[in-house]
Image: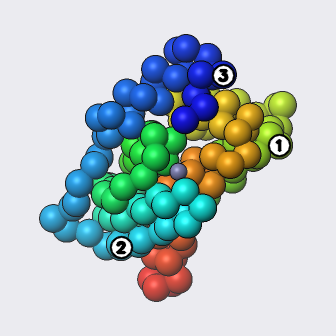
Amino acid sequence: MALSKLDNLYRQMILEHANQPHHHGTLAHLDHELELRNPTCGDVLDLQVALKDGKISDIAFSGSGCTISQASASMMCDEVRGKTPAEVEKMVMAFSDMVTGKKDEKADYDELLGDASVLEGVAQFPARIKCATLAWKAIYQAVNKEGEEHD
Ligand code: ZN
C-alpha cells in the first residue's frame, strides 16, 4: 500500500479507522441493506442503514477490503449519522469531488466531511479512488432507495 506519501497524521488516522473500524458489524433493526463491490481491488462492503424521522439513526457495515476502503467506510458511518438523505447527498458529492481532485476552493471540506476529509490524499493514487468512494456510493444508493420507496 503506497500510503507513505501521505502526511503522517493523515496516514495514522486512516490506519486507526481501518484497524478498528467504527460502526463495524450488523444492525438488529434496519431499513435498508446494500452490498457493493469494487472489483478492481476486491473490496466488498455490506451496508445496513436505519432511518428515523427522516434521518439516518443507525448505520453499520461489514465485509472486507483494503485499508482505504475500510477506513473510508468507518469515517463515512461516523459522519452520516443524524443526517438527512439530502445532506448525505451533498456529502457524497463533496467526497467524490475531493478524492478525484475536483475540489471547490470555496467549500469547507472539514466542515462537510469531518474526519473523512483526511482522505483527500487518495487523489494522488488514482487506483485507490474507487476504494475510497465505495462506502459513499453505498450510502448514497441506500438513502436514495429509501426516497423512492416511501415517496
Ligand atoms: Zn480497495
Q: CA distance from mark 2 to mark 3?
A: 37 Å
Query: In the structure shown, which secondary structural element does the residue marked by tag 2 occupy?
Result: strand
User: In the image, 68: left or right of 77?
Assistant: right
From this view, report whether residue 7 is shown above or below residue 133: above
Corner quadrant of residue 60:
bottom left
Residue wearing tag 3: 5
Q: Secondary structure at mark 1?
A: loop
Specify the amino acid type for callout 2.
His
Inspect the image, locate mark 1, and give the three-letter code of the amino acid beneath it. Lys
Name the residue tied to disc 1. 102
Measure the C-alpha gap from mark 1 to mark 3. Answer: 20 Å
Q: Earlier in the sequence, mark 2 or mark 1?
A: 2
Measuring from the top left, give residue 21's x and y in whole percent.
32, 40
The kind of residue tagged 3 is: Lys
As displayed, is residue 13 above or below residue 1?
above
Judging depth in this view, the residue of 17 and 95 nearest the camera is 17
Q: Name the foreground residue: 149 vs 76.
A: 76
Seen from this angle, which residue lies furthest front?
1
Labelled pair 1, 3 in contact (Cβ < 8 Å): no
- Asked whether, in this view, residue 3 is left or right of residue 75, the answer is right
